[in-house]
Image (cartoon, rainbow, N blue to C red):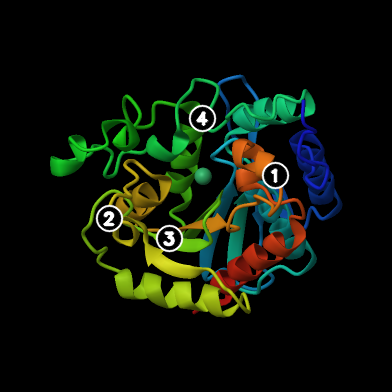
Amino acid sequence: MPLPPPADAYTPLEELLAGLVQLAEEHADVVTVEEVGQTVRGHPILAFHVAPTGDERSDMLVFAGIHAYEWIGVQTADRFLRDLVVAPPEHVAVTVIPALNVDGRLASEAAVRQGRWRDYYRANADGVDLNRDFPVNHEPVGLWSHVLPGYAASSPEPLSQPESRALDALADRERYDRAVSLHSYGGFLYYPWTGTWERPPDWRTFAELGRAMEAAQGGHAYKPRQLSRWGFFFRAHGSEIDHLYGTYGTTAFLIELTRSGVRPWHAADLRTPFRWYDPEDPDPHVERGVRALHALVLAP
Ligand SMILES: [Zn+2]
């Protein structure tokens, strides 16, 4: 059997969360931890709330790990939160959820550890893709219900899973001004709508904020795109960002980090889901994502 891909550059989730909880205890004046829900298997879903140094003028939510194998997003959320604890924004309150689909992530870690690295992990423990479990634009309409039926599939009913309900309840309570859901791979800054071709009413705002995130990254930056308009066959029905924007008015982005972690000259990587999403050296990709997030915090 070929060797498994190196995965030790990524922090195991339980270790990562324990480190953040300890950090929060050491900086209790800056950050508070809240259990905002539990997964199918009863794992806590943790949110870290960072208070601004001055008066609060707006707030922002950053969350990662909706898809099990997208470890790079979790690693990016961890670094971003650690930055904020050292240097909190002056007027922006920020909430970070490092991993929403805790069960899926832990299952994917076990697979990699045990050498079952060709197994595919994306959904939560109930087998539902949380990125398709939200109410807005949940149902494929017209042409889209007939072509690519498998691809266009959404979950049985919106908010069917405890993980999506936890995110929704927090978003409903806080009514965040801005939000980012961290995914991989692709190298784009997507904004709504993801489930319909229509332009969102605030598309100019999205494009402007997207350009601010693009400019902060340096060379070969990820570019802003309305997801449904990027590829003709590309639709995501019931996505978290359509819901946050359509239901709560949150200016919500979905960042597809990296342009894939498949290494040149490693043919086996093409059959290794972990490697599709997670590069061998996460650091430059984390750095790029964190720069984009800070730019969104600072953008007027
Ligand atoms: Zn994803």
| Residue linked to disc 4 | 123
**Residue 48 visible in rendering:** no
For mark 2, give the secondary structure: loop
Residue 255 locus on image (x, y percent):
52, 58
| Residue linked to disc 1 | 33
Mark 1 closeness class: few <14, some 14–19, many ≥20 residues within 10 Å:
some
Q: Which mark, residue 78?
A: none
Left or right: residue 96 compared with residue 157: right
Q: Report how far apart the C-alphas of labels 2 and 3 lie in the structure.
A: 15 Å
Q: Which mark, residue 232?
A: 2
| Residue linked to disc 3 | 190
Mark before the other along the chain sequence, 4 or 2: 4
Mark before the other along the chain sequence, 4 or 3: 4
The response on whether ligand 1 sits within 8 Å of label 1 is no
For mark 1, give the secondary structure: strand
Mark before the other along the chain sequence, 3 or 1: 1
Query: Residue 237's image quarter?
Result: top left
Mark before the other along the chain sequence, 1 or 4: 1
